[in-house]
Amino acid sequence: MEDFDIAVIGAGAAGMMCAAVAGQRGRRVVLIDHAARLAEKIRISGGGRCNFTNLQASPANFLSANPHFCRSALARYTPRDFLSLLKAHRVSWHEKHRGQLFCDHSSEAIIDLLKAECDTGKVAWRRPVAVDAVRHANGSGFALDTSAGPIAARALVVATGGLSIPKIGATDFAYRVAKQFGHKLVEPRPALVPLTFSSDVWAPFTVLSGVSLEVGVATGEKKTKVAGSFVEDLLFTHRGLSGPGVLQISSYWQPGEPIRIDLLPDREPVAELLRAKSATKRQIGNLIAEWLPARLAHAWLETQGLSPEARVADLPDKTLRRLGEAFSVWTLVPSGTEGYRKAEVTKGGVDTRELSSATMMSERVPGLYFIGEAVDVTGWLGGYNFQWAWASGVAAGEAAAEY
Ligand code: FAD
């Protein structure tokens, strides 16, 4: 039986950070992963350039049944701390949009950095290695049965992520271990995911596949905790809607509920249509095509039962009001999502109400930690999920080193 101070299962963003931190504090750490390629999710993230953090990261950018849980770890390990690490490893980066930071060259730089940090901490790698069973003996820590033989450790960190993108190795391992030790789960769901519509609802819009524009998008009652609203790009697809705005709202969307889209967030279409009526003899299709991509303008008028050739001056005020209001509050009920196959993250996971927010340690089983996407903390699109992986990894790494 190999013996370590700390076993970390899952060599992704959170697991590598945690192992490096604990190893650099002099602990004997083993890092186990079943995937053939290291940290594939980091590699494919941010279109290959890894949106590794967001300068604006705050607890308000995260969803959880326990919204204050993320506060402590995020306050103790900030985007600036991660930037110091990048500086030490000479990784260059740039800000793209709204505080989102990306590597200048490739996400491989982040993987190399984490690997080097683990090597500095003399972390022992076991991969590709499967973990078949985990046992806990009070007082003597944890025993793991792995495809590379038995491993014993005083502390165990579970960092195996969520269910998104099963084809690159996502599993429900963290949820199974949590349940085995009596932890509750907040029901996992695909999040940051394209939304789909039934074929009858979507038929008029399939011709718009590829059209993209900035919109306002919202779901839920404004006063409830699950409300969300964003002004970001929307993309029409063959099966429904995608793009950053829709991915953001998908994390808040509850099955059966509508989403509301404001196609003209910077205009007041009712007032502008009524003004245009007195000032122009133009066709409605040409006018709207100045506000929206032409393909969308025409398809949209058709769904409203209006011919693009109709002259604005000939349309009754009531019709123009109805049209203007429809631009501002396009209400649609998605039939579902593209699922874990396309979801960037999993919402829900190990219930944080039985974890310490300072250390990520289980309140049920001393020495057992859950970090990263496996727990019920889900960030917005834009680098927030990696910031949570770093922050929770550091919190657990420091704590497990002292355990
Ligand atoms: P992961 O990085 O998923 O790592 C989990 C590890 O555990 C994996 O290496 C896996 O092989 C291993 N594992 C799983 N099951 C087992 C098992 N049974 N036994 C052993 N090992 C196991 N977030 C951002 O902030 N910015 C982005 O730009 C961004 N882009 C993304 C793009 C895509 C396409 C996707 C899918 C996600 C993106 N995300 C992004 C989300 C981000 O990648 C995750 O939130 C983050 O990787 C979670 O880190 P983690 O360490 O908790 O889990």
Image: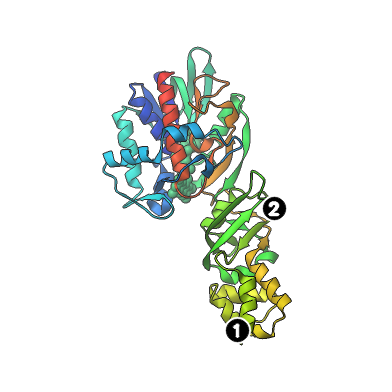
Q: Residues within 10 Å of mark 2 (few under 14, many from 20)?
A: some
Q: Given the image, on which type of amino acid does mark 2 rest?
A: Glu
> Left or right: where does residue 301 sit relative to residue 1?
right
Q: Is residue 165 above or below residue 138?
A: below
Q: In the current view of this chain or complex, which residue is farthest to the bottom?
A: 281
* Residue lying farthest to the top in this orientation: 139
Q: Is residue 32 visible?
A: no
For mark 1, what is the residue?
279
Residue at mark 1: C-beta within 8 A of ligand 1: no
Where residue 261 sits in the image (x, y, percent)? 62, 61
Image quadrant occupied by the N terminus: top left
Q: In the rendered structure, which amino acid carries the disc numbered 1?
A: Ala
Q: Residue at x 63, y 50 (%)?
A: 253
Q: Which residue occupies the foreground of this view, 162 or 144?
A: 162
Side (left or right) of 254 relative to 293: right
Q: First in sequence: mark 1 or mark 2?
A: 2
Mark 1 crowdedness (10 Å alpha carbons): few <14, some 14-19, many ≥20: few
Q: Is residue 106 left or right of residue 235?
A: left
Question: Cβ–Cβ below 8 Å for labels 1 and 2?
Answer: no
Residue 257: image tag: 2
The residue sitting at 52% across, 45% down in the picture is 345
Q: Between marks 1 and 2, how big is the CA–CA gap?
A: 40 Å
- Is disc 2 placed on a helix, strand or loop? loop
Asked which secondary structure carries label 1, the reply is helix
